[in-house]
Each structure stands twice: as C-alpha cells, then as structure tokens.
C-alpha cells in the first residue's frame, strides 16, 4: 500500500495518509493533488478503479483549507528517535541497523539524565561503550547534531522504507 504526503494549505508537511484516504479526501473536494518536480501531478503509477471511474493514486496532496494543528510533545519512542537521527550514530556518523543501534544518554542516566528527546541520541555500540558514563565533552566526543524533539513525520518510518516518492524530497528533509 502506498502512502500520500498530506500538506497543509501553506505546503507545510502534516503527516502521511493512506492511499484510500487520499482518494476519499480528493473526491470530497478537501484536497488537491499538487504538481510534482517533473511538472506532472504528483501521483504513483498505480490506478484506483471503482465502478464509475479510474484515478491514479496521489502521492502528494494539499489541503484546500488550512488546519491549525495543536502541538503536543510526543511521548518518547525508540523507533522515532532512530528515525529522527536518520539511523546514524550521532558521534561517528556510521549508518546503523536494528541490531547495531543503541540509545545514548547525553547526560548519563546514572548522573540524573532523563529519557527525553533532548537528552538521547542514536549511537553505535562502540561509541556508546567509549562514551560510557560520561558526557560527550568528558569523553572527548562531539555530537554531529543537537538532539531535538522529532516532528510528526518521524513517526512514519519513511527513511527506512523502500516506498519513497521523489516529489516528497522538497517538503521533507531526510538528512540523507
């Protein structure tokens, strides 16, 4: 099943929706399929067939009316942390997989560091072991980027999925 990137009316990314939801919203007149990087509508190659019509499945859609999304800090999840960090060690930059990735507390938990978005980063096992029970400064290590609260798009595993549409690139910064 393909997904569609749902943009607010100002073209800011909101979230991914199912292809079925995208087609439903399109027929209800709530969204439009935007023009992609090649000047054509941003669509997948698949066609959705119903008894009365056929439509290409949208890949990138925009709401016609702006929604005010109330921001709530998301609860901590490992997979989201790894997506936020693009599945890379935040000390040495090596690409990681589920068997090699660990969570490192910037301020060690034994010294009062919390399990939070601003205190945790993805790390390879060797960097995590090297840093041990110290801060990065004490261990002589530098973080590649400052840990931040992830956005809603990190909750869908787009970076690790083989399903990626070229038109999403201008709206989503993957860090790749």
Image: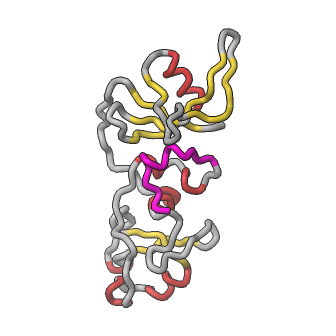
So how many labels did they put on this image? 0
Can I make out residue 155 in this image?
Answer: yes
Q: On the rendered structure, is 70 left or right of 143?
A: left
Name the side, left or right, on which 107 lies relative to 127.
left
As drawn, 75 above or below 108: above
Characterize the magenta stretch by its predominant secondary structure. Answer: loop
Give coordinates of residue 164: x percent, y percent: 58, 47
- Asked where in the image residue 145 lies, by quadrant, the reply is bottom left
Q: Quick one: which residue is furthest to the front in this view?
A: 39
Query: Would residue 71 be counted in the magenta stretch?
Result: no
Q: In this view, does 85 lie above or below 129?
A: above
Q: Between 119 and 37, which is closer to the camera in this rendering? A: 37
Residue toward you, 69 or 175: 175
Does the magenta-highlighted stretch encompass residue 171? yes
Q: 119 or 94: nearer the eye?
A: 94
Residue range highlighted in magenta: 163-176
Question: Which residue is located at x 66 percent, y 9 percent?
Answer: 52
Residue 3: percent from left, percent from top: 57, 38
The quarter in which the N terminus is drawn is top right
Relative height, residue 68 to residue 154 (above, below): above
The percent position of residue 151, horizontal first and vertical second, equals: 39, 50
Residue at figure coordinates x 45%, y 86% from the top left: 132
What is the basis of the colouring in this image?
secondary structure
Q: In this view, does 97 lie to the left or right of 87?
A: right
Query: Is residue 17 in view?
Result: no
Residue located at (61% from left, 52% from top)? 161
Q: What residue sits 44% from the left and 86% below the top? A: 131
């Amino acid at each position: 099943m393909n997904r569609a990137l749902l943009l607010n009316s100002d073209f800011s990314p909101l979230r991914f929706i199912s292809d079925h939801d995208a087609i439903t919203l399109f027929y209800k007149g709530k969204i439009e399929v935007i023009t992609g990087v090649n000047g054509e509508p941003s669509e997948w190659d698949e066609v959705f067939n119903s008894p009365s019509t056929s439509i290409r499945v949208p890949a990138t859609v925009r709401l016609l009316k702006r929604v005010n999304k109330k921001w709530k800090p998301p609860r901590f999840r490992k997979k989201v942390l790894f997506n936020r960090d693009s599945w890379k060690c935040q000390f040495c930059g090596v690409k990681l997989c589920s068997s090699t990735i660990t969570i490192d507390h910037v301020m060690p938990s034994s010294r009062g560091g919390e399990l939070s978005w601003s205190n945790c980063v993805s790390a390879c096992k060797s960097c995590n072991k090297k840093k041990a029970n110290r801060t990065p400064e004490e261990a002589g290590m530098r973080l590649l980027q400052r840990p931040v609260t992830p956005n809603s798009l990190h909750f869908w595993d787009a970076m690790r999925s083989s399903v990626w549409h070229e038109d999403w690139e201008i709206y989503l910064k993957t860090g790749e």
